[in-house]
Image (tube, helix red, strand yellow):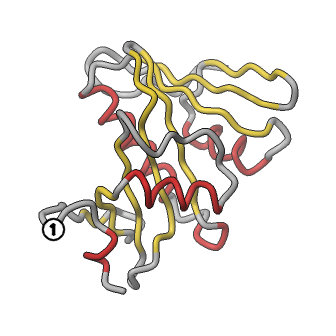
Amino acid sequence: MALQEHLESEAAVVTTTESGAKIASISPGLAGAFLERHRVAGFPAAGNCQAWGAFDDSPSLIAVGALGAIAPPRGWAWIAVAPERRRLRVGSELMALLASAAAARGLRYLSCQHRSNDPAFDDFVRSLGRTVGRRVNDGTAKVVIILAPTGRVLGPVPR
């Protein structure tokens, strides 16, 4: 299957990042399927959503970042990276893209949630150096990232 078959439109822009991944806009349905396969819950693959996929040299989808459930000033973010592709910084590149898209939509906050006992997600969030809030309730951690009015992500947070 060719990379173009995954893209949301024929005119989709494909960007090659520092990690070497190719990132392009994909359909919310494809994003939802990838997120579900990687046990990321809660993505509404319909409605006011926007999604991007990261591909390696083959047409294989290796990561997904999605923005949705938008109710200004807040939006929700979902990110999943195939386990064998972690540590390449693709997740961080997708988070930067989500933050930029969220700021362009006038959002001031991005929220996401994960299992509170998931060390991979905690390591990822720590590597961003930008988490400003985390609350745990019944085994689920909710994380909020504050976006600056200029569209850049604030951070790192002083400890």
In percent of the image, x 28 and y 19: which residue is there?
Answer: 106
Quarter holding the C terminus is: top right
* Residue at the front extreme of this rendering: 46
Label 1 Cα neighbours within 10 Å, binned few <14 / some 14-19 / many ≥20: few
Residue 129 point in image, percent of width and height: 57, 34
Q: Is residue 47 above or below residue 18?
A: above
Q: Is residue 79 above or below residue 87?
A: above
Depth check: 28 or 151 in front? 28
Q: Would you identify the image quadrant in which residue 11 lies? A: bottom left
In percent of the image, x 50 and y 30: which residue is there?
Answer: 76
Secondary structure beneath dot 1 equals loop
Quarter holding the N terminus is: bottom left
Residue 124 point in image, percent of width and height: 63, 46
Q: Is residue 145 above or below residue 22?
A: above
In percent of the image, x 57 and y 22: which residue is there?
Answer: 144
Q: Would you identify the image quadrant in which residue 2 lies? A: bottom left
**Left or right: 57 with respect to 32?**
left
Depth check: 110 or 5 in front? 5
Residue 97 point in image, percent of width and height: 35, 44
Q: Name the residue carrying label 1.
A: 10
* Residue at the left extreme of this rendering: 11
In percent of the image, x 40 and y 60: which residue is there?
Answer: 53
Count of labels in the image = 1
Depth check: 16 or 142 in front? 142
Residue type at numbered disc 1: Glu
Q: Is residue 74 above or below residue 20?
A: above
Residue 39 point in image, percent of width and height: 69, 54
